[in-house]
Amino acid sequence: MLSIKHIVKQYAAHRALDDVSLEIEKGKIFGLLGPNGAGKTSLIRIITQITAPDSGEVIFNGQRLNSDHISQIGYLPEERGLYKKMEIGEQVLYLARLKGLSTAEATRRVKYWFEKLEMGSWWNKKVEDLSKGMQQKVQFVATVLHNPELIILDEPFSGFDPVNADIIKNEILELNKQGATFIFSTHRMESVEELCDNIALIHRSKKILDGSVAEIKEQYRNNTYWVEYQGAYNTDLSADLFEVVQREEVKGKTILKVLLKEGRTANQLLAALLPVVAIHRLDEVIPTMNDIFIDQVKQKN
């Protein structure tokens, strides 16, 4: 759906994006990750045509990105853009009309979303009367009600309590099931694990990692395990099998985090321990996206 090819963006002496290329498949949820100041917002502003790249191009559904595509994109920015003194219903209708909907169709869709998200009583309230989380719900509705093909969400869960965050997460998944493609920018790595099919990590204006979440996590597995047992075992006897990374004693049990030596397997670990101790647990340590994010950013600093 979206091909981002060799994008460069310079602001005075600061290069915000340096030869960044990405492929975002139709119907996927794509995580755009990176520390503050990495270049994520600059890239989003180019996709939404708020700014233009200095070089490179963006292809949207086989065409070079142009103003005709604006109506096919929904954008929820990190810095919210609601008019604080304006009534909620009137404001969302106005934003829907800007996206090309007729008054009748805009009214129908706004009422549908307000009812769906239990916002019916907010119609005549002003934005300034709402909590941050309630304002976020309004902004989300304004982002999706014109049924865009591509929905860009920048920190969409900011301000939400866990219940409302779960409601919006489920709406994202439902819209995705109906065919919407998402670009999802966040610092909440647990949301990336739950929602994203693919990710790209940008750091200091460059792309340093991309691929499917499953493939990346598989790539960063490093043969580390948690093992919990009861009994006495001298780990020095297995120095050629594993290295103890972490150790603690809890209620008569030993809990080890071990790194297996190259070529060694979990079966060999079990074979060494089973004759002398009672095994209660053996779990592989699968790196989280948060672990991978921190590791990659530290390597590039």
Image (spheres, grey):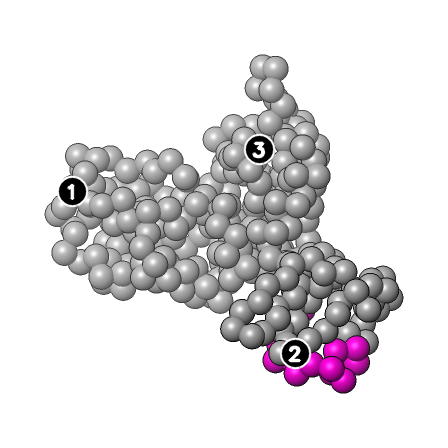
Question: Mark 2–mark 1 contact, CB under 8 Å?
Answer: no
Mark 2 to mark 3 CA distance (whole Å):
53 Å
- Of 199 and 117, nearer the camera is 199
Residue drawn at point x = 69 percent, y = 75 percent: 232
Q: For the residue labelled by badge 1, is the local secondary structure a helix, a strand or a loop?
A: helix
- Of 104 and 74, nearer the camera is 74
Badge 2: residue crowd in 10 Å (few <14, some 14–19, many ≥20): few
- Of 170 and 182, nearer the camera is 170
**Label 2 belongs to which residue?**
231
Mark 2 to mark 1 CA distance (whole Å):
62 Å
Answer left or right for 66 relative to 153: right
Residue drawn at point x = 63 percent, y = 36 percent: 203
Q: Of callouts 3 and 1, which one flags the residue occurring earlier in the amino acid sequence?
A: 3
Instruction: Please tell me the numbered disc located at residue 39.
Output: 3
Answer left or right for 81 relative to 3: left
Q: Quadrant of residue 301?
A: top right
Against 5, residue 257 (above or below) is below
Q: For the residue labelled by badge 2, is the local secondary structure a helix, a strand or a loop?
A: loop
Q: Amino acid at mark 2?
A: Gly
Mark 3 to mark 1 CA distance (whole Å):
33 Å
Badge 3: residue crowd in 10 Å (few <14, some 14–19, many ≥20): many
Answer left or right for 277 relative to 289: right
Q: Position of residue 87 (x, y in %)?
A: 16, 42
Residue stretch rendered in magenta on the structure: 270-284
Residue drawn at point x = 41 percent, y = 48 percent: 156
Q: Position of residue 134 (x, y in %)?
A: 25, 49
**Label 1 belongs to which residue?**
129
